[in-house]
């Protein structure tokens, strides 16, 4: 399910080193498009699988892993790339 996003992300990182800015923008837009589409479909599928009485617990855990951790970890990855590129 995430194969398209992973492939486009890896190719995007490779092309940032090798080619021009327009290729980076192209792969970024492809990555963004597939990520949004996959997240919407996965989110709807997850909502159907939750039990009604436990939906708050599952949504809280999902928010921790899908929002909080990337918000904390990604700035360090970005600063590492900016400093050592």
Image (cartoon, helix red, strand yellow):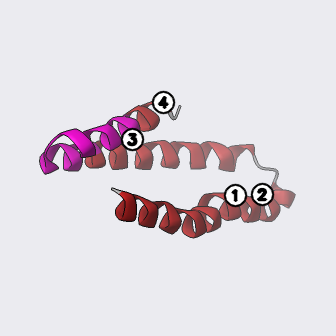
Q: Is residue 62 left or right of residue 27?
A: right
Mark 3 to mark 1 CA distance (whole Å): 22 Å
Labelled disc at residue 58: 2
- Residue picked out by circle 3: 9
Label 3, secondary structure: give it: helix
| Residue drawn at (67%, 46%) of the image | 46
Q: Position of residue 6 (x, y in %)?
A: 46, 36
User: In front: mark 4 or mark 3?
Assistant: 3
Sequence-first tag of 3 and 1: 3
Reply yes or no: does residue 61 show up in magenta.
no
| Residue drawn at (66%, 64%) of the image | 63
Near mark 3 (Cα within 10 A), the count class, few <14, some 14-19 or many ≥20, is some
Mark 4 to mark 1 CA distance (whole Å): 21 Å
- Residue picked out by circle 1: 62
- Residue picked out by circle 4: 3
User: In front: mark 4 or mark 1?
Assistant: 4
Sequence-first tag of 4 and 3: 4
Mark 4 to mark 2 CA distance (whole Å): 25 Å
Label 1, secondary structure: give it: helix
Magenta residues, start to end: 8-27
Q: Is residue 12 above or below residue 52?
A: above
User: In front: mark 1 or mark 2?
Assistant: 1
Label 4, secondary structure: give it: helix
């Amino acid at each position: 399910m995430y194969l398209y996003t992973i492939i486009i992300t890896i190719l995007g990182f490779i092309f940032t080193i090798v080619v021009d800015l327009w290729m980076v923008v192209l792969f970024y837009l492809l990555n963004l498009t597939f990520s949004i589409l996959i997240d919407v479909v996965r989110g709807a599928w997850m909502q159907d699988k939750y039990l009604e009485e436990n939906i708050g617990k599952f949504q809280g855990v999902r928010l921790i892993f899908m929002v909080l951790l990337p918000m904390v970890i990604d700035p360090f990855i970005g600063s590492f790339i900016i400093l050592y590129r």
